[in-house]
Image (cartoon, grey):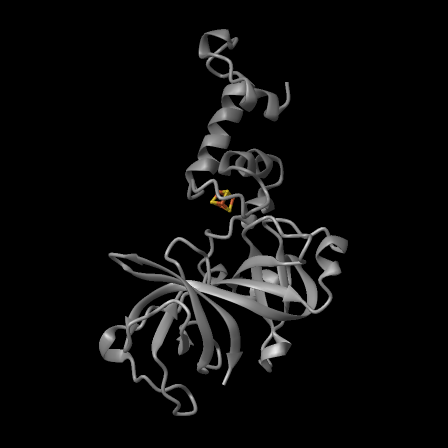
Amino acid sequence: MSIKDTMGNRPSISHLSSPTSPVIFKYMEIDEILSRLPGKDCGLCGYRTCRELAEIALAEPEAIRRCIYLEPQRDYQIPELGEGEITWKDVLGREYDFVLNKYPEDPGPRETILPFNPANVERLKVKKGDILYGRPASTGCPVQHAGIVVEEPDYFNGLIVWCVVGPLQARERGISIGCYTPVAYEGIVKSSRVELQIGRRYDFLPRYCMLQSRHSGLVNMISRTKDGDRVRLEGIWIE
Ligand code: SF4
C-alpha cells in the first residue's frame, strides 16, 4: 500500500495487524512532519495541502523546505513602521501620503505583474507555488525581485499574481521571467496623512521597497477594515 493510499483511505486501527505495524509508524511519522508545518493548506509549496507535502517529505526530507513559512529568511522580516517612526519622507526627501504594508496573511507584498513577453507565462508553464524572479524595468527600478506565485496565472493576458519574497528562495528554485511591468500592488494601509478615495492618485511608500523610494499609484479598490484600509493600486511608477 502506498503512502498516498494510506492517507487517502485511512484504515481504522482495528484493521491493522499490530500496534507496531509499519503503516502505523508511517502515520506517526507523517503526523510528526505535519506538526511542524503551519497547517495553512495554502498550496504555495506546490502541493494542495500541508499533509500532501508531509507525505512527500517522508520519502524526501528536503521537500519540507518548500513550505514558504518555515524558515525566517524566507519571509519578509521588515517590521511595520509605528506611527512615531514614520518620517513621511522617502530616501530622497520626497513626501508621501501613506505607507503600504503587506496583507498580514501573505508571505510578502502582493503584486500583479506582466512580463515584457507575456507569452513566457504559458511557455514556462508558470503555476501557483512557483518562485520567479525578474526586474521591474518599466519603473526604472534597478533591483531584481523574487516572488512566489499565489494564484493560477492568467494565461490569456500573461498576468501573474505573486508575493515578493527574499532572494534566497529564487536561488534555490527560481525561474527567470526577465523584465516585467508591475500592473498592481495590493496591501493594507494603516498609516495615512490623507483620506483615501477610489479614483485618486497618491504618492506612497511600499514598506518593503529596498530603495525606500516613493511610488505613485491610482487607488481603484478600497476595503475598509478595523485593521486598516485594504487597497489595490494600479498605474504604478516610481517618481
Ligand atoms: S506552503 Fe506550507 S502552509 Fe502552505 S500548503 Fe505548503 S506546507 Fe502547508
* Residue 199 locus on image (x, y percent): 42, 70
187 or 82: which is nearer to us?
A: 187
Please tell me which residue is depicted at 74% across the width and 60% down the height of the picture: 120
89 is higher (above) or lower (below) than 51: below
> x, y percentage for residue 107?
46, 57
Q: Position of residue 90 (x, y in %)?
A: 40, 86
Residue at the extreme front of the image, as rendered: 199
The residue at 58%/42% (across/down) is 61
Q: Position of residue 164 (x, y in %)?
A: 52, 64
Could you say which quadrant of the image residue 208 lies in? bottom left
Q: Is residue 208 above or below residue 75?
A: below
Q: Can you say whether 76 is above or below 66 in the image?
A: below
- Residue displayed at 73% across by 53% down: 122
- Residue situated furthest bottom in the rendering: 93
Please report the residue visible at 57 percent of the width from the left and 35 percent of the height from the top. 58
Instruction: Tell me the quadrant of the picture where the N terminus can be found.
Output: top right
- Asked whether, in this view, residue 145 is left or right of residue 90, the answer is right
Report whether 180 appears left or right of 150.
Answer: right
Task: Classify 188 as above or below 45.
Answer: below
Tell me where residue 137 sits by quadrant.
bottom right
**Which residue is the extreme one toward the right?**
123
Q: Nearer the viewer, residue 128 or 63?
A: 128
